[in-house]
Image (cartoon, grey):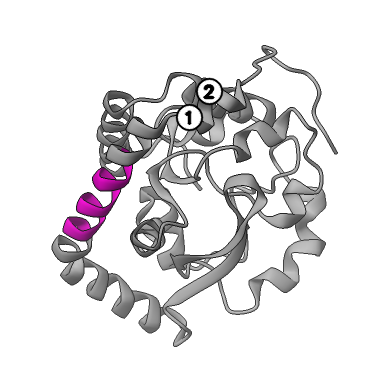
Amino acid sequence: MKNNNRIKDTRINKEFIDNQHTYMFFKRIFDILLSLIGLIILAIPCLIISLFIFACDRGPVFYTQERVGKDGKRFKIYKFRSMYVDADKLLEKLKEKNEVTGPMFKMKNDPRVTSVGRFLRKTSLDELPQLLNVLRGDMSLVGPRPPLPSEVEEYSEYDKQRLWVVPGCTGLWQATERNNVGFAEMVELDLKYIQKRSLFLDAKIIFLTFLVIIHPNGAY
């Protein structure tokens, strides 16, 4: 169900976005360097996380899922598995308990999430494998979160503006409001970022994301 109760009517100039060549060149260098450094520094913590995930239910450590990226291009996103195996099959039964508006599903006490997964989600540590997506070029460190294909099917043309840029591991929404706002507000925050994006803003969002890991802001 679409949510048309907009806070603003933010329209993005796609031609201007596509012509930000200098910004995109340095953003890509920024992404490659930081993701490589991150993978090296976080190698041991990621190993420890992997052991905890496996010990929880002896299931796979990693989880892949199809997402929609820039201009509708689909790709496989990597995450640490935070749910029980085959949790996707239970989604249909839980949709009536959705706690956010619009074409997203969020449930604070989702029974599909493991005990280890609950901690990983709260601290956003389940997202660390997406540094591989950044190296591949599917994602950037900062940008709108890549949605599921089923979510995009419910997007209005207005909502699809958030697909005009490379999606990110974190963004203005995750670093500020997270699950405290609904879908329409999330779109507005993403469009605000797209309008004002710069290397300085990207660095600021990454810094705020580190603070969120230390002091979670309502993630679940």
Which numbered dot is residue 213?
none
Q: Name the residue located 48 percent from the left edge and 28 percent from the top edge.
A: 177
Question: Please, what secondary structure does the residue beneath circle 2 have?
Answer: helix
Judge the density around disc 2: few (<14), some (14-19), many (≥20) Cα neighbours within 10 Å: few
Which residue is tagged 2?
16
Kindly indicate whether the residue at mark 1 contacts the one at mark 2 (C-beta within 8 angstroms): yes
Q: Nearer the viewer, residue 199 or 150?
A: 199
Which residue is tagged 1?
19
The majority secondary structure of the magenta stretch comes to: helix
Q: Quadrant of residue 26?
A: top left
Question: Please, what secondary structure does the residue beneath circle 1 have?
Answer: loop
Q: Name the residue located 65 percent from the left edge and 72 percent from the top edge.
A: 87
**Residues in magenta?**
27-38
Q: Quadrant of residue 211?
A: top left
How far apart are the alpha carbons under marks 2 and 1? 5 Å
Q: Name the residue located 45 percent from the left edge and 45 percent from the top edge.
A: 168
Work out which residue is located at the far top of the displayed protein and give it. Answer: 8
Image coords of residue 107 (percent x, y): 64, 49
Work out which residue is located at the far bottom of the displayed protein and give it. Answer: 58
Instruction: Give the quadrant of the N terminus.
Output: top right
Image coords of residue 171 (percent x, y): 43, 36
Q: What amino acid is at disc 2?
A: Phe
Q: Nearer the viewer, residue 193 or 212?
A: 193
Judge the density around disc 1: few (<14), some (14-19), many (≥20) Cα neighbours within 10 Å: few
* 196 relative to 209 in the view: left or right: right
Q: Name the residue located 26 percent from the left edge and 54 percent from the top edge.
A: 32
* 204 relative to 55 in the view: left or right: left
